[in-house]
Image: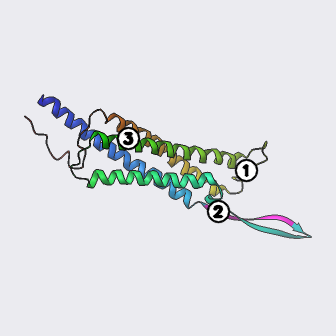
C-alpha cells in the first residue's frame, strides 16, 4: 500500500513537470507565431506601366490584415497562448491546489477546444499561403510570393511555429485526458513535499 502511494506520487509529480514543460513550449510556439504573423508586413514599389518613356510606379503593401485567414491565425494563436499562460500561472502560483475531477475535466475540455482552434487556424493559414505561393490558375489568382518574398518567408516561419504548437497542444490534451483517471495534486511544491506514509 505504501509503495503504491509512493509510485503514484512520483508519477504524478513527473506528469505535472512534463505537463508544465509542454505548456511553456506551447506558449512560446503559439505566441511567437502570433507575433511573427502580426508584425508581418512588406512594402514594395513596382513599375505598373509607361507613359511615353516615363515609367509609372505604384507602391503596394502586403499585410496580414489583408487576408481573413491570417487575421484568424493571429487571434487563434493569441488565444491559445493566453490559455497556456493561465494554466502555467495556476500551476506555479496556485499553491497546493487539489485537482478534483470537475477541474480536471474543465482543463481537458479547454485543452481540446484549443487544439481544435489552433489546428483550424494553422490549416486555414496554410491553405491561403499555398495560394499565395503558387497561385491558382483555374480561379485566375496570381501568386504573390515571387514579389513579396520576405512577407512569405515570415509567414512560413509563423506557420512552422503554429504547427509545432498544434503538436504540443495535442500531447498536452492527451495528458490532460489521461489525468482524469487519477485526480491528484499538481503544484510547484509537490516535489518538495514527501508523501506521508501510513
The numbered disc on residue 108 is 3
The numbered disc on residue 107 is none
- Asked if residue 44 lies in the magenta stretch, the reply is yes
**Residue 167, position in %: x, y?**
46, 40
Query: Left or right: where does residue 77 sit relative to residue 53?
Result: left
2 or 3: tag closer to the N-terminus: 2
Q: Callout 3: helix, strand or loop?
A: helix
Residue assigned mark 1: 143
| Range covered by the magenta-colored residues | 41-49
Query: Left or right: where does residue 116 sit relative to residue 139?
Result: left
| Disc 2 to disc 1, C-alpha distance | 15 Å
Residue furthest right as drawn: 52
Give the crowd class for mark 1: few <14, some 14-19, many >=20 residues within 10 Å: some
Residue toward you, 37 or 88: 88
Residue 139 seen in render: yes
Residue assigned mark 2: 42
| Disc 2 to disc 3, C-alpha distance | 40 Å
2 or 1: tag closer to the N-terminus: 2
Considering only vertical position in the picture, is 148 above or below 122?
below
**Residue 116, position in %: x, y?**
49, 42
1 or 3: tag closer to the N-terminus: 3
Q: Where's the C terminus, which quadrant? A: top left
Considering only vertical position in the picture, is 92 above or below 186?
below
| Magenta stretch, overall SS | strand
Amino acid at each position: 500500500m505504501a509503495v503504491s502511494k509512493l509510485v503514484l506520487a512520483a508519477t504524478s509529480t513527473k506528469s505535472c513537470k512534463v505537463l508544465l514543460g509542454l505548456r511553456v513550449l506551447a506558449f512560446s510556439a503559439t505566441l511567437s507565431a502570433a507575433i511573427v504573423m502580426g508584425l508581418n508586413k512588406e512594402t514594395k514599389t513596382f513599375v505598373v506601366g509607361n507613359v511615353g518613356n516615363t515609367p509609372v510606379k505604384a507602391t503596394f503593401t502586403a499585410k496580414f490584415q489583408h487576408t481573413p485567414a491570417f487575421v484568424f491565425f493571429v487571434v487563434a494563436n493569441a488565444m491559445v497562448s493566453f490559455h497556456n499562460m493561465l494554466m502555467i500561472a495556476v500551476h506555479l502560483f496556485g499553491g497546493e491546489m487539489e485537482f478534483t475531477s470537475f477541474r480536471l475535466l474543465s482543463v481537458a475540455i479547454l485543452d481540446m477546444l484549443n487544439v481544435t482552434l489552433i489546428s483550424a487556424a494553422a490549416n486555414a493559414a496554410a491553405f491561403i499561403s499555398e495560394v499565395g505561393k503558387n497561385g491558382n490558375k483555374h480561379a485566375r489568382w496570381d501568386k504573390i510570393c515571387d514579389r513579396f518574398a520576405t512577407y512569405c518567408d515570415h509567414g512560413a516561419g509563423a506557420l512552422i511555429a503554429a504547427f509545432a504548437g498544434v503538436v504540443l497542444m495535442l500531447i498536452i490534451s492527451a495528458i490532460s485526458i489521461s489525468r482524469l483517471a487519477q485526480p491528484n495534486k499538481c503544484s510547484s511544491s509537490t516535489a518538495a513535499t514527501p508523501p506521508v506514509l501510513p
